[in-house]
Image (tube, rainbow, N blue to C red):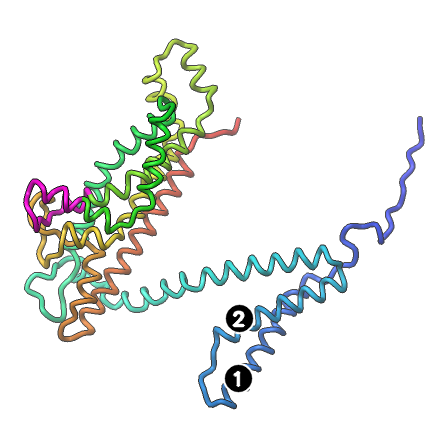
Amino acid sequence: MAAVTIRPVSAGSALSGNRLPRSTPWIILGASLVISFALFALLAAAAGGDFSVVGAVLVGALLYLVASTGITAAVEGRRQATDRLVTGLVTSAFLLAMVPLVSVAITVIGNGVARMDATFFTSSMRNVVGEGGGALHAMIGTLLITLAATIISVPLGLMTSIYLVEYGRGRIAKTITFLVDVMTGIPSIVAGLFAYALFALFLGPGVRMGIVGAVALSVLMIPVVVRSSEEMLKLVPHELREASYALGVPKWLTIVKVVLPTSIAGITTGVVLAIARVIGETAPLLITAGFTASMNYNLFADRMQSLPVYVYTQYANQGNPVEAFLDRAWAAALVLILIVMALNLIARLVAKYFSPKTGR
């Protein structure tokens, strides 16, 4: 039996070299923040101005990056210092991006929770000129308009994506893909103007109906549904299609029985996210559906209120007392955020529980 020789590895040849304790970055961060806050406090006291928390945090973060990079380079080497610098930059960018999101959430919740009462959810603004009133008519309008837009968009978008993936070849498919990409980036106000102009040709100028708003939202939804469904259909393995064709199943039945069930979770997620993307649009609905203080359950007659337009009208047309209008606007904004959050949660649950299981 051949002898096996084990060679000891020297400390100098190790990749990591000397290592700082795990608590060192936190100690450096704490010291940097303390120095920064003390410096800003002295400057505020000397100038007689206000203490800037944001400025102190930013300066403390810069001090941390410089100090941690320098100490790491001296102890662990240039490679570990670069790694720690990039990690700090990425973390700082993430926290900086979270600041406006957290600030918006705190502001909306703090200002909107005061009017989250039973009256707000059970009454409209009919005959209300001051305090009281609610947003039931706006919630119903948002539900009906978004539902109609979904009914229009999902079949068109899904069948377009099926054509692009399963049938489309050559110049026609490339043209459709190009137009879908262009539609993805059009401003929402353009979609509203298109829907208004389309219905104005048949019903005359000044038309305001819920169905017009649904058509405007569908213009925004269709490209999102097409792109998301197209990507999900492309993820279906070709082996599944070939196995179905080998059994003599026609192509259309293969799509219905094999391709769509395999990708249904991703398609559903894309549809839900498309709904969440358009449910908060204000400009197209302001042009096409208008606004009203009364309930309207008919998409094909008269004006129809929606939550985004309700927020705009309450804030823009303030009456007496002003606080009542602002409270209603903030409460409606909070309801809209909760609806979007619920839709995103539904999309995640659908993707988790209805996606095909790949394990044995």
Estimate the spatial distance between the alpha carbons at disc 2 and disc 1, rounded to whole Å: 14 Å
Name above or below for residue 160 compared with residue 238. Answer: below
Name above or below for residue 134 compared with residue 272. Answer: below
Q: Which residues are magenta?
A: 195-215
The type of residue carrying mark 2 is Leu
Q: Secondary structure at mark 2?
A: helix
Q: Quadrant of residue 231?
A: top left
Q: Quadrant of residue 25?
A: bottom right
Residue drawn where x is 39% and y is 35% of the image: 266
Q: Secondary structure at mark 1?
A: helix
Q: Could you classify mark 2 by the number of other residues whose Cα lies within 10 Å: few (under 14), some (14-19), or many (20 or more)?
A: some
Q: Report the quarter where the N terminus lies.
A: top right
Residue designated by label 1: 41
The type of residue carrying mark 1 is Ala
Q: Main secondary structure of the magenta part?
A: helix
Q: Quadrant of residue 347?
A: top left
Sequence-wise first label, 2 or 1: 1
Name above or below for residue 8 compared with residue 137. Answer: above
The disc label shown at residue 344, or none: none
**170 within the magenta span:** no
Residue drawn where x is 53% and y is 70% of the image: 58
Give 106 or 66, whichever is nearer the viewer. 66
- Residue 216, image x, y percentages: 21, 45
Residue designated by label 2: 58
Q: Could you classify mark 1 by the number of other residues whose Cα lies within 10 Å: few (under 14), some (14-19), or many (20 or more)?
A: some
- Residue 128, image x, y percentages: 9, 66
Work out which residue is located at the far front of the displayed protein and give it: 171
Locate residue 249 relative to residue 287 in the image: left or right: right
